[in-house]
């Protein structure tokens, strides 16, 4: 009986994760289509690279404890909304907003939440645009709607976040003050770099060598 129960639990878990894998695949397809379409019709590619990850069971359980919620599958499905995660890196800030708008506007994508840490960086300097979307996954016997977290950022934001993540991990979130200050300063430098690159791009567009076929960046 115990062996049968363990097998059932393993099967439920595998099915649980599989649906998120399909959710990731569906979002990746949408991004691939945008990217290919853009490559064929425009000079400039707004998406530099894309990565994805499925949150580990340990991280999911950590988060349920942090949220103080139950860890049964229906609760986890509803409360933990970043089990499926996609990260899109763009060259320019305006591209990040453009990609967010394009994805959110798709009819089968329900935009659940949008956190704009570019306009409103976190106190430690973290910048990125986060979307929580819900998309349908069509299975043989039912349709499931899964949450996917999409993080959209520039190369400079990504560079900063990756260094900050490594340092925070190393110091287990108890960063010495000088490192915290240094990171905050580096975040300001990264933001300045993004602003400069944005100005350079605008100048190139004014010269008409790049911008003719590029959609006008959102006015942010
Ligand atoms: P992983 O391994 O990347 O998944 P919470 O998720 O509850 O902590 P919230 O408000 O639900 O917080 O989510 P939020 O703040 O929108 O961001 C969650 C994810 O964004 C994190 O996932 C990181 O990937 C990234 N992130 C947010 N803040 C920071 C930061 O200060 N530095 C770095 N490097 N990344 C950040 P996880 O679950 O922490 O980790």
Image (spheres, rainbow, N blue to C red):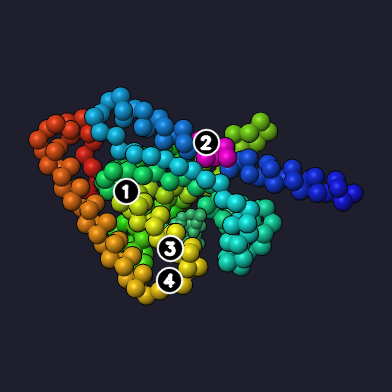
Asked whether mark 1 lies closer than 8 Å to ligand 1, one says: no
| Mark 4: secondary structure | loop
The residue that disc 1 covers is: 154
| Mark 3: secondary structure | helix
Comparing 43 with 67, the one in front is 43
Q: Are marks 2 and 3 in contact (CB under 8 Å)?
A: no
Q: Marks 4 and 2: which is nearer the front?
A: 4
The residue that disc 2 covers is: 25
The image shows residue 120 at horizontal and vertical percentages of 32, 62
Q: Are marks 1 and 4 in contact (CB under 8 Å)?
A: no
| Mark 2: secondary structure | helix
The residue that disc 3 covers is: 167
Q: Residue at x 58, y 43 (%)?
A: 20
The residue that disc 4 covers is: 175
**Magenta stretch, overall SS:** helix
User: In the image, is residue 27 above or below residue 189?
Assistant: above
Instruction: Count every numbered label the image shows and give the total.
Output: 4
Q: CA distance from mark 1 to mark 4?
A: 24 Å
Residue ranking furthest to the left:
207
**Mark sitting earlier along the chain (4/2):** 2
Q: Which residues are magenta?
A: 21-26
């Amino acid at each position: 009986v115990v062996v049968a129960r363990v097998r059932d639990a393993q099967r439920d878990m595998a099915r649980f994760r599989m649906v998120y894998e399909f959710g990731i695949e569906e979002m990746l397809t949408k991004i691939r289509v945008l990217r290919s379409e853009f490559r064929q019709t425009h000079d400039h590619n707004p998406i530099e690279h894309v990565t994805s990850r499925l949150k580990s069971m340990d991280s999911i359980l950590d988060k349920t404890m942090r949220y103080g919620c139950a860890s049964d599958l229906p609760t986890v499905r509803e409360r933990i909304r970043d089990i499926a995660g996609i990260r899109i890196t763009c060259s320019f800030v305006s591209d990040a907003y453009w990609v967010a708008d394009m994805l959110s506007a798709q009819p089968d994508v329900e935009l659940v939440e949008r956190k704009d840490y570019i306009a409103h960086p976190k106190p430690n300097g973290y910048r990125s645009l986060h979307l929580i979307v819900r998309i349908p996954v069509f299975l043989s016997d039912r349709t499931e709607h899964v949450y996917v977290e999409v993080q959209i950022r520039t190369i400079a934001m990504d560079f900063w976040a990756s260094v900050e993540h490594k340092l925070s991990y190393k110091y287990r979130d108890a960063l010495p003050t000088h490192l915290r200050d240094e990171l905050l300063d580096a975040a300001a430098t990264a933001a300045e770099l993004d602003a400069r690159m944005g100005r350079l791009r605008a100048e190139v567009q004014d010269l008409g060598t790049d911008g003719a076929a590029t959609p006008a960046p959102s006015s942010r």
